[in-house]
Image (tube, helix red, strand yellow):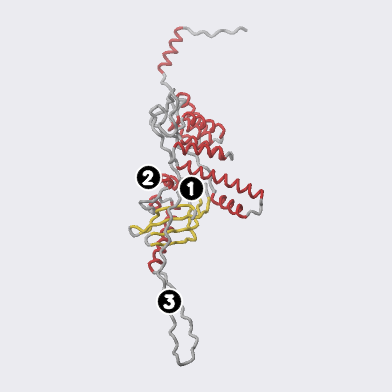
């Protein structure tokens, strides 16, 4: 048997070329299509689409970041880490790749590497609240390891036992991924020149500075709260002196009347308890407008982030899927004119996190109602 070589006549070749010209070019996939597959849980299809985008635009930062998110959700953590690592090398001004790389390191219990990645993210964008929160979680994990080691060396160390229990009680969640791709005004291009320094201008390609997603940040040291004014001392009542003629009779000691709490304080405390319960109830109902209405105009946002950015972050947390339950118990109230400090035990329960911690609110009385001016965990 002999093999016949395949030959194509010129006419056949010409016809094939005309047919190819007549066929429409295949449309390039878009990130919108990729994200639609991700929302439907079709991760292999999403990965295929994003790879098609990168085949045409291999330096597209948004597509590369999205690929890292897809690989993470597919539990291909090592592959995702490679994507984030290379992306952070090419675009050191973007904080999100550092954050997500740190999340992978933390899941692998490589907390020192996670800490280093988060510090780079914060150095790039000091107002990136998600990285601040994750860094706090990593520090707590490192502290937990240290206390655990102390207990291994000295099992009778009650202070280490208490601190370890407090950390485990507080740490009910995990470090958080940034799922939103870095935003740019146009597809990022890599210039031949060296990249600009991290905290100054973007890469030399007229790239717009990315807007990082904002989350809850570690809360600032509170402003000292003045102690409530001491009530005026009650006048001491003396017993009348006995007459000189009869034998002295032991007079019963007269005690000063007990100081009665002013009615105004009773009403203020009742109003504060009602306000805290309404605040927790709005949070549990995911009533964003009602929840935010409890915060004063001059509320000190965590980390000093802009008020609108903080409100946007709180809205995204309140409206995430699944029920939320928040309660405030054992309220301790300290009043001082139109200011008050409320300390209580906050219990939080959601699909991803269950925790209990001491919470402190600093309140001001304005426009006929109590409003939150400061909020912090602990005393």
Mark 1 or mark 2: which comes first in sequence? 2
In the rendered structure, are the residues bearing label 3 and label 2 in contact, judged by CB atoms less than 8 Å apart? no
In the rendered structure, are the residues bearing label 3 and label 1 in contact, judged by CB atoms less than 8 Å apart? no
Mark 3 or mark 1: which comes first in sequence? 3
**Which residue: 44% across, 90% down?**
243
**Which residue: 52% across, 48% down?**
353
Mark 3 or mark 2: which comes first in sequence? 3
- Inter-mark Cα distance, 3 to 1: 61 Å
Q: Quadrant of residue 1?
A: top right
Image coordinates for residue 51, horizontal then vertical, percent: 49, 27
Which secondary structure lies at badge 3? loop
Q: Residue furthest bottom?
A: 245
Q: Residue furthest left?
A: 367
Instruction: Please say if 37 is above or below 158.
Output: above
Residue topped by disc 3: 236
- Inter-mark Cα distance, 1 to 2: 25 Å
Instruction: Please say if 95 is above or below 16.
Output: below
- Work out whether residue 8 or residue 65 is closer to the camera in this orientation and state it: 65
Which secondary structure lies at badge 2? helix
Residue topped by disc 1: 322
Residue topped by disc 2: 308
Image coordinates for residue 108, horizontal then vertical, percent: 58, 38
Image coordinates for residue 332, horizontal then vertical, percent: 47, 61
**Which residue: 43% across, 34% down?**
199
Image coordinates for residue 150, horizontal then vertical, percent: 63, 49
Q: In which quarter of the image is residue 338?
A: bottom left
- Inter-mark Cα distance, 3 to 2: 56 Å
Instruction: Please say if 263 is above or below 276.
Output: below
């Amino acid at each position: 048997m002999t093999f016949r070589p395949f030959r194509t006549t010129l006419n056949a070749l010409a016809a094939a070329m005309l047919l190819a010209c007549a066929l429409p070019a295949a449309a390039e996939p878009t990130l919108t299509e990729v994200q639609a597959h991700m929302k439907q849980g079709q991760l292999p299809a999403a990965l295929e689409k994003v790879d098609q985008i990168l085949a045409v635009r291999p330096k597209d930062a948004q597509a590369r970041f999205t690929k890292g998110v897809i690989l993470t959700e597919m539990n291909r953590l090592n592959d995702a880490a490679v994507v984030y690592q290379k992306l952070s090398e090419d675009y050191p001004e973007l904080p999100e790749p550092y954050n997500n790389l740190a999340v992978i390191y933390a899941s692998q219990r490589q907390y020192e590497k996670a800490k280093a990645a988060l510090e780079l993210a914060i150095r790039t964008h000091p107002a990136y609240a998600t990285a601040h929160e994750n860094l706090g979680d990593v520090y707590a994990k490192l502290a937990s390891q240290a206390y655990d080691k102390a207990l291994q060396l000295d099992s009778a160390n009650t202070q280490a036992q208490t601190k370890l229990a407090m950390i485990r009680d507080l740490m009910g969640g995990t470090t958080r991924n940034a799922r939103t791709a870095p935003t740019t005004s146009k597809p990022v291009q890599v210039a031949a020149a060296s990249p600009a320094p991290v905290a100054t201008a973007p890469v030399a390609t007229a790239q717009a500075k990315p807007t990082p997603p904002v989350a809850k940040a570690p809360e600032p040291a509170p402003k000292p709260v003045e102690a409530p004014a001491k009530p005026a001392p009650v006048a001491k009542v003396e017993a009348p002196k006995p007459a000189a003629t009869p034998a002295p009779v032991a007079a019963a000691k007269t005690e000063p009347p007990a100081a009665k709490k002013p009615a105004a304080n009773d009403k203020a405390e009742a109003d504060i308890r009602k306000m805290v319960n309404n605040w927790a109830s709005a949070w549990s109902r995911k009533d964003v407008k009602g929840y935010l209405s409890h915060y004063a105009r001059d509320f000190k946002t965590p980390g000093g982030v802009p008020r609108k950015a903080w409100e946007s972050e709180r809205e995204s947390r309140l409206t995430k899927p699944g029920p939320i339950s928040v309660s405030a118990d054992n309220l301790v109230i300290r009043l001082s004119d139109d200011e008050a400090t409320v300390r209580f035990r906050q219990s939080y329960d959601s699909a991803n996190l269950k925790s209990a911690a001491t919470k402190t609110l600093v309140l001001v009385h304005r426009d006929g109602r109590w409003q939150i001016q400061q909020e912090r965990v602990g005393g």
